Image: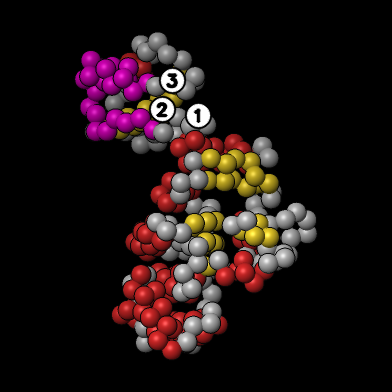
Amino acid sequence: AGKSTTMRILTGFLSANEGTIKINGHDLESNAVDVKKLIGYLPEGAPSYGDMTVISFMKFIGEIRGYKGDELRERINHVLGLVDLQDVTLQAIETLSKGYKRRVGLAQAIIHDPQILLLDEPTDGLDPNQKQQVRALIKSLSKDKIVVISTHILEEVTSVCTRAIIISKGKIVADGTPADLEGKSRYHNAVTIKLLRPYDISEDLLELTEELSIEKMENSLGYCVVSEKGESLFASVSALAHRKNWPIKELFATRGQLEDVFSKLTQGA
């Protein structure tokens, strides 16, 4: 798709072969040093020096950023507190879990209090608990910073993003809020029905007047009812369920599926 390449170009690690890049109104090519001061960057996989302890690595990064003495100590303590690394400061980075290594990567990216954070696949390879922790950190950091993440994990988009851009073969094929993109899905306003026991409701659904398609779940314990015109079906399906006394476990409307939109846009790009 070109996600990581885009990140590397935006941070100046790679040179663009055409076009211009402006960060906060500053041209990257002509003001590279000043622009890079505005940016914190977490590369894919959060690379670091594994044999260094967390505290020694942070001192190393802080000194590169120009901090010394009390100011350096204050910045390190502040950042380690933000990402909750105080308990592992004396551990070698190579002994840490993937989740903690990602926190170290975030810490080095924000030690100079940048206005903009670029995070390349920040939760890739993490277990569910670690993903939640890193996403919570990203949300916290986004309160006073611009945070740009690249990800192929679509649930991450709805979890942490206020704007989403889909890239296919190096070109932007969609740009909007997650809700905007979900609205383009054929599953926008679809109704999901989960049942307490196997029960065929297909015949009952034919009583509805809307144009719809019915998708049966593999375990026969659920259905997805999709309006062919994108109309809201929840009220009519809910009324039908009550009238026919279906053994309902859950009944809810969906905003749409990003996977559906992503596949449609990228396969046709």
Q: Quadrant of residue 98?
A: bottom left
Which type of secondary structure does the marked residue at label 3 adopt?
loop
Q: Can you identify the residue that label 1 sits on? A: 186
- In this view, the residue in front, 131 or 34, is 34
Q: Can you identify the residue that label 2 sits on? A: 190
Q: Residue at x 47, y 87 (%)?
A: 68
What span is colored magenta in the figure?
Answer: 233-254
* 59 vs 147: above or below: below
In the rendered structure, the answer to whether residue 81 lies left or right of residue 101 reads left
Q: Are marks 3 and 1 in contact (CB under 8 Å)?
A: no
Q: What colour scheme does the image use? A: secondary structure
Q: Are marks 1 and 2 in contact (CB under 8 Å)?
A: yes
Mark 1 residue crowding within 10 angstroms, few (<14) / some (14–19) / many (20+): some
On whether residue 237 falls in the magenta region, the answer is: yes
Q: Amino acid at mark 1?
A: Arg
Q: Can you identify the residue that label 3 sits on? A: 231
Where is residue 30? Give x, y as percent: 72, 65
Where is residue 253? Give x, y as percent: 35, 30
C-alpha separation, residue under disc 3 versus residue under disc 2? 8 Å
Q: Amino acid at mark 2?
A: Ala
